[in-house]
Image: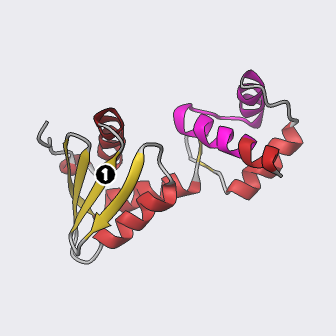
Amino acid sequence: MKFRKERQEAMRLIVRNSQIRTQHELVTALHEQGYHCTQATVSRDIGEMKLKKLPEGIYVLAEDLHLQRMVHDLSHSVARSGNLIIIHAQGGTAPGVAGAIDEADIDGVLGTVSGDTTLLIVTVDEAHAVSLEEKLRSFAAPAKKKKGRR
């Protein structure tokens, strides 16, 4: 059981940090990290983890896809100061966006706090905040990619 959880966490990181298109690519990436498993095992893990495949053929985590849709559809702006990120969202939607961030279990995120229209994300350090800000900006609609304070 523990080995499966560790393997699935490795899969989570691989899918988040690479553009995996096939189960074979995922098996190979896992082998490179010391996880010796079969394509059948990876296929079962994909089902358990509810990985999705984008139209471009790339695997994504369901929670990342949900977060992407929430940020794209509901946010007005993303800004960062140090290790803090602020998202301004449509009225009443900030708690939902915060929940999507919490659910995504993003590396380096300590937590979120939201009001009605504003969401604060606290990260462990500025480097994690910069990385997350870039990810959130890539999710936002083109008109919403405003620069925050540095």
Q: Is residue 20 above or below residue 132?
A: above
Q: Give the colouring mode of the picture.
A: secondary structure
Judge by depth and name the residue closer to the eye, 69 or 49.
49
Give the residue drawn at x 25%, y 49%.
85
Judge by depth and name the residue closer to the eye, 70 or 5.
5
Q: Which of the 4 quarters of the picture holds residue 149?
A: top left
Give the residue drawn at x 80%, y 42%.
42
Q: In the rendering, at what x and y percent does residue 27 appear?
A: 78, 31
Judge by depth and name the residue closer to the eye, 124 or 101.
124
- Say how many tags the image has: 1
- Describe residue 27's horizontal placement relative to residue 52 as left or right: right
Give the residue drawn at x 32%, y 38%.
125
The residue labelled by disc 1 is 122
Which residue appears farthest toward the top when viewing the image? 32
Residue numbers of the magenta segment: 7-32
Q: In the rendering, at what x and y percent does residue 115 appear?
A: 23, 72
Type of the residue with mark 1? Val
Locate the C terminus by quadrant: top left
Which residue appears farthest toward the left when viewing the image? 149
Q: Is residue 15 above or below residue 95?
A: above
Q: Which of the 4 quarters of the picture holds residue 134?
A: top left
Estimate how packed mark 1 is, as few (under 14), some (14 to 19) or many (20 or more) residues with alpha carbons within 10 Å.
many
Give the residue drawn at x 74%, y 57%.
48
Q: In the rendering, at what x and y percent does residue 7 appear?
A: 74, 41
Q: Main secondary structure of the magenta part?
A: helix
Q: Is residue 148 above or below residue 71?
A: above
In magenta segment, residue 72 = no
In magenta segment, residue 25 = yes
> Which element type, helix, strand or loop, lies under badge 1?
strand
